[in-house]
Structure formats: C-alpha cells, structure tokens
Amino acid sequence: MHTWHWRNDEGLPYLTCSLLELWHHGFFTQQFWPRSPQELTKVLQPEALVYRLQQVHGNTVLTPQEVDSKLNTSENELALADGLISEQPLQALWVASADCTPVLIGDVKTGQVAAVHAGWRGTAAKIVPQAIARLQAQGSKLDDLRIAMGPAIAGEVYQVSVEVAAEIGSTITPDEDPQTIVAALHDLPNSPMLADSQPGKVRLDVRRVNALQIDMLGISAEQVAIAPYCTFQTPEHFFSYRREREKKVQWSGIVSIA
C-alpha cells in the first residue's frame, strides 16, 4: 500500500505520498492559508519556477510555455485552465482546492509532472485523462506514471443530483439515460455511488470516478494513491467549501526533476 506522511514546515502540517517520493511535493493544509504558491514553493524547492492558474472547472491542461504566452497576450493576470504539465526540470506546478480533487502526477522516467484540479465538472470532462494524454504526447509511457489524489470531499458526504451523477458517470458508463447510468454505477464493484434518502439525489465519490477513468486507460491500481482524508470531515486540517461556504483554498504542488 502507498503510505501518506505528515510533514511539517515551521510547525505547520502538510501531506506527502510515498508514490511521489522522487519529487518535492505536498498537499498543503489550511494552516498555510493565505500563503501563495510562490511562498509554498520555498518549502518544497526554492530554486523552482512557480506556475499556477485561474481555475475555471474545465478540462484545459497547459504547459508553462503556454501559460507564459497567454500572460503576454491577455489582460488577465492568470491563464484560465485547471491542469498544468511541466516541460523542464524545476517547474513547480500548483492547483488549489477546497473540496475538489487535487491530482499530482509524476513520470519516473522523464521526471516530468502534472498538477490537476478535478472538480465534478472537470471530472465529467475527463481532465485527468486529458493531462495524461498530454504527458504521453511529451513521451511519457503509462507504466511510468505515478498518480496521487489528495484530500477532497468523500462520497459519503457529497450529495449531488442524479443529473450531475449521470453527467460524471457517463465517462465510465456511456448512455443517454441518467437513470441507466446511475444504476450501472451502483452495480460496479466498490461503487463510487451511494444511495441518498432524498429523492433525485445520490452521494458520489468523485475521486473514485477519477480512479475508474485512470483504470480505463490501462494504468494499474498500484500506480494510483488516494489520500485517506475528506476535506469536509477533517475541519482541523482542511477547508471545505460545502462546510464553510467561504472562498478559501488549500494548495497542492509538485516540482519536476531532471
């Protein structure tokens, strides 16, 4: 099993995963709020160049070069996207989350990395397979990838409508009919879906759906780790938008290696 370790910086806790031990990385807690990725990169690898995005719940994945070119041409301070993949060593990639899934990916052969923000909309649009496809286009092989999903809202407390569940579930079980999709998801072993007492609602484990999408690409379960923490149920460490309705986030980052 992959192990998750609490580290600390000046007494403040952050989480790392043994699967990503080759890379400086961290899933940071609310204790670091409101520090920026620039400041947090100093904790991981002070020499690294820092990249972050204005996240928009889509499935766009950019390289640092694309981020830089977008900055030169737009009034917007940050590029609009939800995923980053590195091209060079010493690029620190960051995503923010407050219930959505932060996904950090590393390639053991090339040293390149990806950071992805997978909310329910991004998951419905298959952002993690999109990031993996971009890594493959840069020469990554699926067997060489290591994927860690950080703290996010757990299925047992994440109530969504049947329509939302079907939109996400159609990435696993393609069908036109929401009820058919939901029924098929229910029948899966270790199902990402749980019943809800409210009519028209279900509980959905978005990280598990991402794991199923990754599995469908032919990536083995040993290459994937899911943090045993729920943002909603761990208020001592993590912000949860569902719990607090505040616009606060925790950052997750990873630094590419040569």
Image: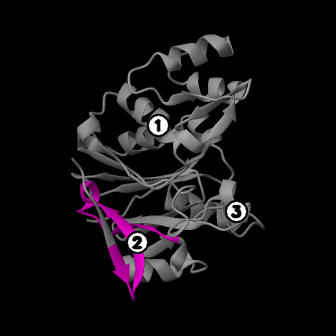
Q: Which residue corresponds to mark 3?
A: 244
Per the rendering, the mark at residue 170 is none
Query: Closest to the observer: 83 or 239?
Result: 239
Q: Which residue corresponds to mark 1?
A: 210
In the rendered structure, which segment of residues is drawn in magenta?
Answer: 7-29
Q: Which residue corresponds to mark 2?
A: 14
* Disc 1 to disc 3, C-alpha distance: 25 Å
Q: Are there few (<14), some (14-19), or many (20+) residues within 10 Å of tag 2?
A: many
Q: Are there few (<14), some (14-19), or many (20+) residues within 10 Å of tag 1?
A: many
Mark 1 and mark 2 in contact? Answer it, CB < 8 Å. Answer: no
Q: Are there few (<14), some (14-19), or many (20+) residues within 10 Å of tag 3?
A: few
Q: Is residue 109 visible?
A: yes
Asked if 174 appears above or below 36 in the picture, the reply is above
Query: Closest to the observer: 46 or 195?
Result: 195
Please report whichever mark, 3 or 2, sits nearer to the chain's N-terminal start. 2
The percent coordinates of residue 17 (x first, y second) are: 30, 59
The percent coordinates of residue 64 (x first, y second) are: 50, 62
Q: Amino acid at mark 3?
A: Glu
Query: Closest to the observer: 140 or 204?
Result: 204
Q: Residue at x 53, y 39 (%)?
A: 155
Question: In the rendered structure, does residue 173 fall within the stretch colored magenta?
Answer: no
Q: Amino acid at mark 1?
A: Asn
Q: Residue at x 73, y 65 (%)?
A: 246
Q: Residue at x 56, y 38 (%)?
A: 123
Quick check: 174 left or right of 78?
Answer: left
Mark 3 and mark 2 in contact? Answer it, CB < 8 Å. Answer: no
Please report whichever mark, 1 or 2, sits nearer to the chain's N-terminal start. 2
